[in-house]
Amino acid sequence: MSTDLQSAAITGLDNLELGPPPPAAEPGRIARTAWAALWPKLLAIALVLVIWQLVTLTGWKHYVLKGPRTVFADLWGQMQHLQLWQIIEVTLRTAALGYVLALVIGSVVGVLVARIPPLRAAVGSIITGLQTMPSIAWVPFAIIIFGETESAILFVVILGAAPSIANGLITGVDYTPPLLLRAGKTMGLRGFALYRYLILPASLPAYVAGMKQGWAFAWRSLMAGELVVQIIGQFSIGQQLAVDQQNLDFAGASSVIIVILVIGIVVDTLFTKADLTIRRRRGLLDNAL
Amino acid sequence: MSILNGRMSPGEPVPGPSGYPDLTAVADRTAQQESTAQLESTWQQESAAVRLTEVSKVYGQGRGALLALDKVSLSVAPGEFVCLIGASGCGKSTLLSLVAGLDQPTSGQIDTSGLKVTLMFQEPALFPWLTAARNVELALQARGISKAERRARALDLLEAVHLGGFGTKRPHELSGGMRQRVAMARSLAQDADVLLMDEPFGALDAMTRDLLHDELERICAERTLSVLFVTHNVREAARLGDRVIVLSSRPGRVIEEYDVPRNEPRRIDSFDVAELASTITDRLRQEMSRHVN
């Protein structure tokens, strides 16, 4: 077979195997997919509101329980005031600082534990144990050590988030396909380069999953911490909730809970997006999804 | 003179009475019939890219120990294409791991004369988070080649396997045959003199495999690579090899060598390929039948 014919046959077969190019995006497709993703969520919210309204109408605990209309009016009112935004800012700043520290500590511990077998035997099960520990249980301990300070809250947040992050990284390293390791070694990747160019990128999906779980734990731990630890001059979401509790302010407490829920969901969505992007790039997702 | 000896020392292949290379003459001889001393002296006279001398590999210890390779001696001359074939349990993959330096032999010597050796697998083993071009570039980077040069060389290598336009694709966006060619480009990027291939086309369909045989032949000729190619496919071995070495199973031993004279371009459906393949198949079946009990 002539070389020209051979090249043409190969290129032709490649094109056949890859199939026809995907059809151009039709107008309105983005809006349709957005709507398809949105309506189940709207339905869920509507359901909760309807049930809530029905419970209110039965008159159960009518002296404290308020309907959705009252609560959203309260929330709307709070949104007009600077104080709500200030407490959100304080809480988010603590959350960011605590999460970044947890990320650093969790990653360093994760790499060390994954690399050094004796350390794995010693620390591996402790990390899993820490994950099952309810974060509120750390609060008294943290107050004994740090007093009622931001450090106490950060301590609780880090203990909540770091184990998940470390565990995610360790799992990722463990699940690096042996064939890729052989390929990398054949290529001459050794030591640090092997980690930098093969093991860490291969671990990324599990690492991001660990980071996502870590965020969920961090957010819970932060709320637990803020509810109990009263820092003078630094009013936070958790403290607002504690005050509402003392005043038996149902509408105020409900508003704060809605704020906590929304922030948690928004950040979680960001992690889910990152996770999907990584998996799509690696061909771990059905492209039809 | 047997073709086996003819191959070992410089000389033309011996045509048989029919005008086709006389393969049966070789088939009648076994490597075991040659005295080891005689073979060794032949090897020492000639330069080899890869030489294994009485290489054994034992896995495990004590009663559970498994002898995977038993005193395997073979060599690959510079620029030669040697196919290794055997039934399951002949230790083909073990042998390649030893030559690649990923594992150590229990006894015996492996000499690659300081040449660079690279290994290709049945799976492309590309890094799924990198594009095709970056996969190739990483092999260049591991050799310490500068960033600017890497990019250009990676494109050239992809061009060499007819994938010039696919550098930005990720592995999952390519077909099986294309991925295996990216893996080929990545192996070439390692600038090795010796290419070890572990059933590289085993997972591909027959049409793609035929095309890749031609491709591999062209690439090896252009770069004078020495190749040690492991396969389960007798036709493939007869199609590609300058020499076909048959291994026994449990433990792996060299039981036969067939020299394949290269008079004209071969194809998978050439008459002499078919003839050699049938001879090898008979020999392999004979070997398999030893394992009835």
Image: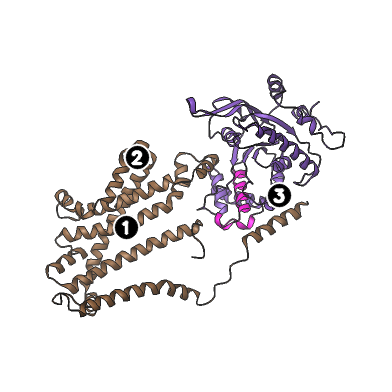
Chain colours: A brown, B purple
Closer to us: B276 or B290: B290
Instruction: Tell me the chain of label 2.
Output: A
Which residue type carries mark 1? Answer: Trp
Tell if the residue under mark 2 belongs to the same chain as the one under mark 3: no
* Residue at numbered disc 3: B210
Callout 1: chain: A
Quarter of the rendering containing residue B188 = top right
Q: How many neighbours does mark 3 have within 10 angstroms: few (below 14), some (14-19), or many (20 or more)?
A: some
What whole-number distance in Å separates the C-alpha atoms at marks 2 and 1? 24 Å
SS state under label 2: helix
- Name the one closer to the observer, A231 or A125: A125
Residue interval drawn in magenta? B163-189
Query: Residue A21, position in %: x, y?
Result: 61, 66
Could you say which is closer to the camera, residue B160 or residue A168? Answer: A168
Looking at the picture, which amino acid does disc 3 mark?
Asp
What's the distance in space between the residues labelled 2 and 3, CA to CA?
Answer: 49 Å
The local crowd at label 1, few if under 14, some if 14 to 19, many if 20 or more residues have their Cα within 10 Å, is many
Q: Nearer the viewer, residue A16 or A143?
A: A16
The residue to which callout 1 is attached is A215
Dominant secondary structure of the residues highlighted in magenta in the image? helix
